[in-house]
Structures are given as structure tokens and as C-alpha cells.
Image (tube, grey):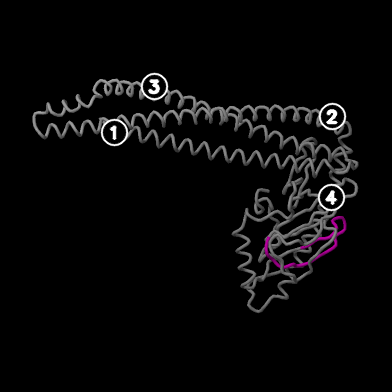
């Protein structure tokens, strides 16, 4: 029975330890997410709203406010989860404190009884008489052992009281800290909710303005989409031409290849494999930025009859920011495109990364570039005041979603 109780106690201790570690890990993950969202909101405010008071279209304002609203809603969700986790931890600590108090009271009671018993038999004479009254030497030896064990046990009880008292004090201190953290999160959530309420009121006013002349704004969006589609067609043609040109200039040991696929040398093939193995871990093409348009088809949130398409990702960044290569590679081409400023294509084996809307370029065709190497300066839109780069990723002639390749995009 004793072994069974010991096993149950050890198992309970192990489960509690695992639970505490899991809660600690979850707390760390949630705090990291909260800091990421706070940084995202900061970037949105800096890159989308602090544009030197340039004239802003209703469509642009609605889209920018929508991004800030989504970020604030994410922040509220995360802080709610953090507060709920702290509530659970506080409840667990309260139970631990009650349990420790009970254990401490029991230990103190046992210790008090020991002290009384020890006091009654504390005289040297009584201890000698206890030994002399032994029937034989063996019994006297056992009585000496008993007295030593009793003294040791008394010392251990005193140390146990000290440990339990310190543990109780630490738990109380931890509980107070957790309660402060929870109150801070609740206050932050309240502030964020108030900001969100005002943001939604502003958005509603802008949406009402959109709805008044929906056909005009829908026409503007479709017109911009036609311009974007035309630029995409030009880039697709440049990619195909770059592949053909690369294949014509490839070495004798190149394998495969056609008008739509690269003929890769052994070195280029190894580079392509390395690019593939880094999927999801590639750096952003800017030092800091916020995604303003994502890959694929999207239905406009306020104009449901309007659908847009983005062939890559558009990232808003700071004025004068440099574009940088997302991986090691070779510059295939540098072009000037009408409506998209300058463009750079970089080959990574059978992959191509395309960067456009550059005001100036610092690389030339044939240059070898390294990961995060600066390749040019991003152009600033004089009307909106925004500095936006567009990144596309191809595998041969097939467009890929950059968010699948770039870290936390």
C-alpha cells in the first residue's frame, strides 16, 4: 500500500510539473504573438497612415483602416487568451497555497509534539537512565540508534517547516505578480477595444461614402486591376525570355530545359535544391514592412461584386528603403517597366524572384548576389506618399505564393 501511495504521489508530481511547463510554454508563445501584433500595428500606423498628410482616396483609406482593424482584433484575441491563461494559473496557485498551508500546519503540529516530548526527556540523566534500563547490549544499541534517528528527524522537520514557509512566500509573491499582469492585460484590452470602436465608426462612415457611388469606385478598382494584369503579362513574358536566354547561354553540362524550364548546371541545380529546403524560412525583401496585398484572388470586403487578383505580394515599407534579395542567386535581368518603375529578376536554380517598383538599381545582369544583399531603392508614390515593393516568386514559369516561402509573411 505504501509503494502504491508513493507511486501515485510521484505521478501526480510529474503531471503537475508537465502542466506547469506546458503553461509556461504557452505563456511564452502568446507573449511572442502579442509582441508581433503590436509591432504590426506600429508598422501599419507608420507605413500606411503617417504619409506626410498626402491626399488619400476613400478606397485606400478603407483598405488601410481594415488592416488596422484586423490587427487590433487579433491583439484583443491574444490578450484575452493571455488573461484566461493567467486566470487558470492563478486558480492553480491558490489551490497550491491552500495545500501548502495545510501541510505547513500539520508539520508544525507534529513538530510541536516532538518539541514537547523532547523537553520532557531532555535531561542527560533521563537519557542515561533510558540506556541503563536496557535488558542487554543489543537493546541499548537500538535505543542509541533510536535517539539519533529522533534527533535527525527533529532536525529534518525543522528544515521542512523552513522550506514550506519559503515556498509559500514565493507562491504568494508569484500570485501577486500574476494578478498585476492580468490587470495590465485587461487594461490594455479595454484600451484596444475603445480604439477599435472608433476605428469601426470611421470605417462605417467611409463605407457609407463608398456605397453612395459604388459603381464609380468599382470602376476605379477594375481599372487598376487591368493595369496590374498588363504589368503581370509583361513580367511573365520577361520570365519566359530570361529562361530561353539562360538556356542558350548554359554550359555543356546543363541538363533538361526548354522554352519554359531552366536547363540547370550542377551548381544551379544545387542552388535550387537549397532554395527549396529553405521554404518558409526566406527573409523579407525589406528590412521592415507590412503586407498590403496578398497573393491570389480576393473579393473586395466592402464591394462584394468586385474581385481582384494579386500575382505576388505587395509590401509597404519606409521612405527610401532598399530592396534586398531573398536568397543567393544570379541576376537574370534588370528592366524598366511602364507603370511599375524598375524591375530585377534573380535566378535561384529553377526559381526566380522578381522585385519591382524600384526607383534605382544597384545590380546588373550576371551579378551573383547573396541573401539580404541590397539590390536597389524602392520607389515612393508621390500621390499617396506610400513606398511599396511587389515581390513575385516563380518556379520556371509558374507563379508561387511568396507567403509560403518567406518567413512569417
Badge nearest the viewer, 3 or 1: 1
| Quarter of the figure with residue 307 | top right
- Residues at discs 3 and 1 in contact (Cβ within 8 Å): no
The answer for how far apart the CA atoms under marks 4 and 1 are is 88 Å
| Quarter of the figure with residue 18 | top left
Residue closest to the far left: 136
Residue 237 in picture, x, y percent from top left: 78, 63
Q: Is residue 152 above or below residue 321?
A: above
Q: Which residues are magenta?
A: 327-344
> Is label 1 in a helix, a strand or a loop?
helix
> Is label 3 in a helix, a strand or a loop?
helix
The quadrant of the rendering that contains the N terminus is top left
- Residues at discs 4 and 3 in contact (Cβ within 8 Å): no
The earlier-in-sequence mark between 3 and 1 is 3
Give residue 111's mark.
none
The answer for how far apart the CA atoms under marks 3 and 1 are is 20 Å
138 horizontally vs 145: left or right: left
> Is label 4 in a helix, a strand or a loop?
helix
In terms of depth relative to the viewer, which is nearer, 23 or 385?
A: 23
The earlier-in-sequence mark between 3 and 2 is 3
In terms of depth relative to the viewer, which is nearer, 109 or 409?
A: 109
Residue 408 in picture, x, y percent from top left: 65, 48
The earlier-in-sequence mark between 4 and 1 is 1
Where does label 4 land, which residue?
A: 226
The answer for how far apart the CA atoms under marks 1 and 2 are is 79 Å
Amino acid at each position: 500500500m505504501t509503494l502504491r501511495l508513493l507511486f501515485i504521489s510521484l505521478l501526480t508530481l510529474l503531471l503537475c510539473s508537465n502542466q506547469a511547463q506546458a503553461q509556461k510554454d504557452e505563456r511564452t508563445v502568446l507573449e511572442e504573438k502579442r509582441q508581433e501584433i503590436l509591432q504590426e500595428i506600429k508598422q501599419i500606423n507608420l507605413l500606411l497612415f503617417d504619409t506626410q498628410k498626402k491626399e488619400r482616396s476613400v478606397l485606400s483609406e478603407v483598405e488601410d483602416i481594415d488592416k488596422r482593424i484586423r490587427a487590433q482584433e487579433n491583439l484583443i484575441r491574444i490578450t484575452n487568451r493571455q488573461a484566461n491563461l493567467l486566470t487558470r494559473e492563478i486558480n492553480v496557485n491558490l489551490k497550491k497555497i491552500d495545500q501548502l498551508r495545510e501541510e505547513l500546519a500539520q508539520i508544525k503540529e507534529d513538530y510541536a509534539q516532538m518539541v514537547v516530548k523532547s523537553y520532557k526527556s531532555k535531561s542527560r540523566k533521563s537519557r542515561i537512565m533510558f540506556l541503563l534500563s536496557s535488558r542487554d547490549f543489543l537493546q541499548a544499541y537500538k535505543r542509541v540508534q533510536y535517539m539519533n534517528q529522533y534527533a535527525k528527524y527533529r532536525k529534518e522537520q525543522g528544515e521542512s517547516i523552513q522550506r514550506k514557509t519559503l515556498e509559500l512566500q514565493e507562491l504568494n509573491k508569484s500570485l501577486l505578480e500574476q494578478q498585476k499582469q492580468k490587470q495590465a492585460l485587461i487594461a490594455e484590452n479595454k484600451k484596444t477595444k475603445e480604439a477599435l470602436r472608433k476605428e469601426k465608426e470611421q470605417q462605417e462612415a467611409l463605407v457609407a461614402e463608398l456605397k453612395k457611388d459604388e459603381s464609380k469606385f468599382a470602376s476605379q478598382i477594375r481599372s487598376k486591376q487591368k493595369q496590374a494584369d498588363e504589368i503581370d503579362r509583361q513580367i511573365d513574358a520577361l520570365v519566359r525570355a530570361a529562361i530561353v536566354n539562360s538556356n542558350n547561354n548554359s554550359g555543356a553540362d546543363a541538363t533538361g530545359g526548354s522554352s519554359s524550364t531552366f536547363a540547370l548546371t550542377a551548381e544551379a541545380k544545387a542552388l535550387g535544391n537549397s532554395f527549396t529546403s529553405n521554404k518558409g524560412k526566406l527573409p523579407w525583401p525589406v528590412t521592415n514592412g507590412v503586407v498590403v496585398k496578398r497573393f491570389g484572388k480576393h473579393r473586395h470586403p466592402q464591394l462584394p461584386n468586385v474581385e481582384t487578383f494579386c500575382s505576388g505580394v505587395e509590401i509597404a515599407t519606409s521612405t527610401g528603403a532598399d530592396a534586398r534579395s531573398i536568397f543567393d542567386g544570379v541576376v537574370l535581368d534588370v528592366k524598366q517597366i511602364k507603370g511599375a518603375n524598375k524591375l530585377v529578376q534573380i535566378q535561384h536554380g529553377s526559381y526566380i524572384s522578381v522585385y519591382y517598383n524600384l526607383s534605382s538599381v544597384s545590380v546588373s545582369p550576371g551579378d551573383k548576389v547573396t541573401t539580404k544583399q541590397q539590390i536597389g531603392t524602392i520607389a515612393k508614390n508621390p500621390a499617396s506618399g506610400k513606398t511599396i515593393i511587389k515581390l513575385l516568386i516563380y518556379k520556371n514559369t509558374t507563379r508561387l505564393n511568396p507567403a509560403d516561402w518567406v518567413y512569417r509573411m
